[in-house]
Amino acid sequence: MLSAELKSQIQGAYSRFLEAKGLKPRYGQRLMIAEVARVLGAIVTDDEGRRQGEPAVVAVEAGTGTGKTVAYSLAAIPAAKAAGKRLVIATATVALQEQIVNKDLPDLMRNSGLSFSFALAKGRGRYLCLSRLDLLLQEGQAQSATAQLFEEEGFRIDVDEASQKLFTQMIEKLAGNRWDGDRDAWPQAIEDDTWSRLTTDHSQCTGRHCPNFQQCAFYRAREGMTKVDVIVTNHDMVLADLALGGGAVLPDPRETLYVFDEGHHLPDKAIGHFAHFTRLRSTADWLGQVEKNLTRLLAQHPLPGELGRLIEGVPELARELRTQQQFMFAACEQLADFRAGEDMDGRERPRHRFVGGVVPEHLRELGLELKKGFSRLMEAFTRLTELLKEAMDGEPGTGLASHQAEEWYPLFGSLLARAEGNWQLWTAFTAEDPEDSPPMARWLTLAEGGALHDIEVDASPILAAETLRRHLWSIAHGALVTSATLTALNSFDRFRMRAGLPKSAVSAVVPSPFAHAEAGLLRVPDLKADPRDVAAHTAAIVRELPQLVAGARGSLVLFSSRRQMQDVFDGLERDWRRRVLIQGNLSKQETLNRHKARVDGGEPSVLFGLASFAEGVDLPGAYCEHVVIAKIPFAVPDDPVEAALAEWIEARGGNPFMEIAVPDASLRLVQACGRLLRTEQDRGTITLLDRRVVTQRYGKAILDALPPFRREIG
């Protein structure tokens, strides 16, 4: 039970916060504080401080405007401190992460009377690698001779004038303590291509052997994390840490209370973490490159002992594997019937899916040979990196000077990482799926690969439930999952299934402070066109859209398919088209900035967007007075993970349409409707151009799950 002392501390902090800010308590916010405190503040522990009994997990759906961050921070920070645990707040987007660190937590500290320290934890890839920068600035000198053998691995050393200028500025700012090596703190945007040459990953990092270890931006930031009460990070970093057994970069899960904000993303993020792919032609080319490079390396550096013997064996192994890759490519090309299809972001992805995740036997046998070959390659590279570490430590007998080992380590580390990635893919692709568990989804994708096409081989879990149950919920001291959209069709069943929430998990819905019925109108006009007849539906949208959004300063039109979005745009009159900004022509941020600038300048502006504009886009006030939704956002029928999940549910006697397709579409529709009201002052209209919500059996459930806007059904 929640102790009286902790309860009064949380209540006192909330009262002080409201008073200092001149705010009235929000009903939903108060409810959320109480729910989180009740579960996370009353965890029973043993003498060692370890949680006893069932997992302590609470899921809270809190509508837009509830003030979620304040609610969970006020409850979870005192609860974590009282239990002697650390609090990890994980978000799905960088924007929310930055808001929490730069605005919400400082505001809470100033106004609540709570005393705590906090830090932002980012992955290694957000930080500069000083050794990489040194190498780029010493361009063309003797030290880069080895790196030039490995150009394929991203160790390109040609530096143009603009880059040279940028790198020099970086060194100067670092030397003058005017920059800390964090990409996000650099005053200008840095192109991904440029940044990828300045950063490193764990497989290429020499750690304490690096001459720049004491000044390393990543390790300095990591050291700062060991001392703070609250760590703000992202879902990916938590999942990566759990995949390493937990406690590798973040605190040990047993010593941690977690908050997953934007928590509806967690199951998909977890699936992504355990999905694998490889490209057959580009991997064959890479193996050819490895063979050539290591043969040349040995010619330049004849090496004694185990190191020389191991490197000598790799070219032949790479040659054999390359031949097997070519056999696999030919077999896949012969077998695959690539069907055109779009993914959720509207990209064309021709695919061949293996029904039920079952791979034909001859392909599986070829895959097992590749798994065996990559396993041997991985063993060789693992042993080589171990020997290079010994050489860096100055241990005798390796036959390599420590400075040479230090230069080679990142190169062999990257070779090991790629070999391991291929081994993981072939392991997943050829595995026998257990009888009673969901199978892996397995498919082939036709990929653009320069002049020649390539074939991508993919394997992915279809549910993350078991993974999250085993690695997160059952181990963590406690956890909160929160989002504005956790329920589907007014139930937590969908999220419980996908996230594997333990039976003991508590779930609650707290209301938004928005007066939906006064602020918004939901219209379902009769377009006289069924959305399943795409041509007729598109023609009807082209005909009606200008009239529909007339009078709105900012409008957002959401489509489920890029093709329909483009066809509607092409069908509009040229003059009207000028007010439309279409997703994909510019970066997302630039598109939103131009839209806002037009509205600020008194011009009407219309945004055309896909799934990524239906969520997380914040356009308050005049920027979005009308949301038009072309159709109920059912999942793309050719998504291989969703299709495999549907097959599995059907094989077990379920109804995949009612159990998956309808709840998923309902959730996406709620998210799309959530673009309209961003503040309590906002007013506007949502128009859904899909009458299946009134004509189909499932439509009523979808309609009833939407916020309680006034309705106008045509």
Image (tube, rainbow, N blue to C red):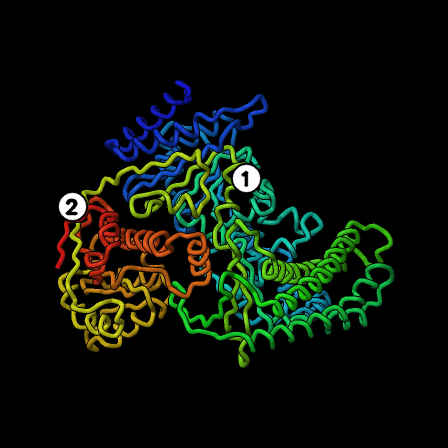
Compared across the picture, whether 111 is left or right of 703 comes to right
Q: Secondary structure at mark 2?
A: helix
Compared across the picture, whether 212 is left or right of 238 comes to right
Q: Residue furthest top?
A: 4
**x%, y% of residue 693?**
22, 56
* Quadrant (top left, top right, bottom left, bottom right) of the C terminus: bottom left
Check the image and report above or below for 36 versus 289. Answer: above
Note whether residue 166 is visible: no
| Pick the front one: 83 or 357 | 357
**Label drawn at residue 225:** 1
| Pick the front one: 553 or 559 | 559
Q: Secondary structure at mark 1?
A: helix
**x%, y% of residue 582?**
30, 68
Q: Residue furthest bottom?
A: 451
Residue drawn at point x = 71 percent, y = 50 percent: 209
* Quadrant (top left, top right, bottom left, bottom right) of the N terminus: top left
Reading the image, the residue beneath label 2 is 517
Which amino acid, mark 1? Met
**Label drawn at residue 669:** none
Residue drawn at point x = 47 percent, y = 25 percent: 82
**x%, y% of residue 303?**
84, 64
| Pick the front one: 624 or 656 | 656
Which amino acid, mark 2? Ala
- Distance from Cα at disc 1 to Cα at disc 2: 46 Å
